[in-house]
Amino acid sequence: MERLFGTDGIRGVANVDLTPELAFKVGRAAAHVLAAAGSPFVIGRDTRLSGEMLEAALVAAICSAGSDVLCAGIIPTPGVAFLGRTHGAVAVAISASHNPVEDNGIKFFAPDGFKLPDAAEDAIEAALDRHDLRRAVGPEVGRAEDLLDAVESYADFVASLATTSFAGLRVDVDCAYGAACPVVPLVWERLGATVVPINAEPDGRRINVDCGSTSPEVVRGAVLAHGADLGFAHDGDADRVVAVDETGRIVDGDAIMGLCAMHLAAQGRLAGNVVVATVMSNLGLELALRRAGIGLERTKVGDRYVLERMRETGAALGGEQSGHIIFLDHATTGDGLVTALQVVNAMMETGRRLSELAAPIERYPQVLKNVRVTSRGGVGTHPTVQAALDEAARWLGGRGRVLVRPSGTEPLIRVMVEAEDADKAEEVAARLADVIERTFGPPAS
């Protein structure tokens, strides 16, 4: 049976895969597994229309098990984790992040603000269909109440990370019709910046639709039209951010990590003098960091693997090319608003524009190909594929990078090639894909 919890909680099409019935079972099981020490729960959500439905099911389930619930309403996922820490509560975020409107998800954080370990998720899953879970009666039934200062409290925390006033700064922010909407104006105006919120109505029908971090050209157009100093684009639950500099150049998660790492290292504040990123981060980031004397550690794709390695090594900065970035000195999970503040801190402290700070992080052309196969196992060690990989490495001559990895969910092998020259990257990727398809692909019909 496929595991219910993926690398980022439970996800699915709301009311099809992720039904209120399933949410209720998950809530009761979570209360049984996680509330043994009497911890309350805090629940927040993004703007998706299905959020209220799933929230109602979770609240009912948790209260029926005798635990109290604080309802934070619409708030970024990292804000939910923050509230869990400050209230000593298990935190539950109802969101599908950057996914389409019809999707939704449930993600748990322990009272320390970190995502649940696999063992805790497995225990919840194992308890889903148990009939002997506690049912509270009478005065033991849990209570639910609205956490009225949730957004203000989180906005205060984010604003506290600014190292100076942002007066005179003009910034455009795409809120993706999502959870960033109630927070963004509070934070930027509190710091003295002139902010132009874009797609800032909390509209669950349009969350992530042709906007936000997956469509950064929207905020790019706004920055150029308004003459802004920079722009930011969040995703639906605001755990990611992509920036745009004053010239309209898109500054992705790799470039953000690079410029922040170099700024912190110059001040002696980059823990371990290392950044943790995934195998998908661009070679340009690795080379820029190497020139600055900063190490790069790579993990499997997924922010939970980045965070695990950060905690193992003591690194304080890590993340993904998508803009999901963790500043572990300040937050326990990726936080788009915290990341945006760190970018502007670097600008204000150095007196340099974003285009100048991001310039050292060159982006190598990157070609991705998906090859459908009958089996994902053993591809990397097969002699024919290994010979093709060795040939690709010789052809790139140390000025490129090849990655071949199986998809975690589909019968696909993903081939990624980076090189200084886009045509060379395309040719190497096509050759590798052809070898893999001939060796592992389905027979010709």
Image (cartoon, rainbow, N blue to C red):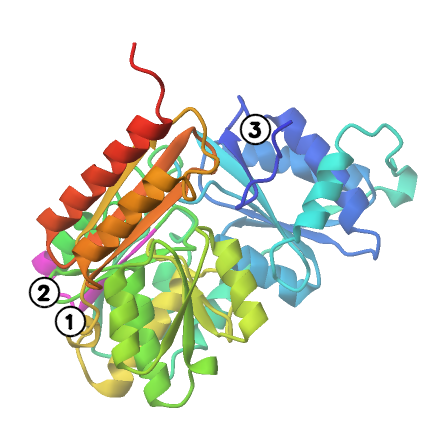
**Label 3 Cα neighbours within 10 Å, binned few <14 / some 14-19 / many ≥20:** some
Q: Is residue 278 left or right of residue 369?
A: right
Question: Looking at the figure, which quarter contains the C terminus?
Answer: top left
Between 14 and 358, the residue placed more toward the observer is 358
**Label 2, on which residue?**
247
Between the residue at mark 2 and the residue at mark 3, the CA separation in whole angstroms equals 42 Å
Rendered residue at 45%/36% (across/down): 48
Between 158 and 397, the residue placed more toward the observer is 397
Q: Could you tell me residue 322's position as x and y percent?
A: 34, 53
**Label 1, on which residue?**
355
Note whether residue 140 is visible. yes
Mark 2 residue type: Thr
**Label 1 Cα neighbours within 10 Å, binned few <14 / some 14-19 / many ≥20:** some
Note whether residue 199 is visible. no
**Label 3, on which residue?**
18
Rendered residue at 57%/69% (across/down): 311
Q: Is residue 380 left or right of residue 444?
A: right
Rendered residue at 65%/27% (across/down): 1
> Which secondary structure lies at badge 3?
loop
Mark 1 residue type: Ser
Between the residue at mark 1 and the residue at mark 3, the CA separation in whole angstroms equals 42 Å
Q: Could you tell me residue 314's position as x and y percent?
A: 54, 76
Rendered residue at 45%/32% (across/down): 103
Badge 2 or badge 3: first in the primary sequence: 3
